[in-house]
Image (cartoon, rainbow, N blue to C red):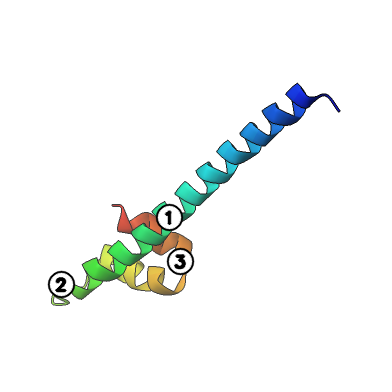
Amino acid sequence: MNLRYRAKTQVGGAIASLVIIGLWLGLVAGWVMNIITIAHSSFTPLEGLLVLRIVGIFVAPLGAILGWI
């Protein structure tokens, strides 16, 4: 293998790894923000979004997206 090609693929792999780690951290942060939003909610008007947030605790991808909304 050519050393230049190997260096380019290693840089590309490192960038891809950083993107994946960043997305994962963003999803975890969204899921935690979803739980915090539920904890600060009053349950008197039980709205559809609140029900989806509660479901998002158990379905993590949904909770991660709703945490950022």
Give the side of residue 14 with respect to residue 58, left or right.
Answer: right
Q: Judge left or right: residue 44 versus residue 28.
A: left
Crowding near the residue tagged with mark 3, few <14, some 14–19, many ≥20 C-alpha atoms within 10 Å? some
Residue position for label 3: 60
With 13 as the anchor, is 61 left or right in this view?
A: left
Which amino acid type is marked by label 2?
Answer: Pro
- Please tell me whether residue 68 is drawn above or below residue 45 in the rendered image: above
Q: Are marks 3 and 2 in contact (CB under 8 Å)?
A: no
- Mark count: 3
> Is 2 placed above or below 54 here?
above
Q: Residue at x 31, y 71 (%)?
A: 51
Location of mark 1 (residue): 25
Element at label 3 = helix
Q: Position of residue 33 (x, y in %)?
A: 28, 62
How far apart marks 3 and 1 lie (CA) works out to 13 Å
- Quadrant containing the N terminus in the rendered view: top right
How crowded pointer 1 is (Cα within 10 Å; few <14, some 14-19, many 20+) is rated as few
Q: Residue at x 46, y 66 (%)?
A: 60
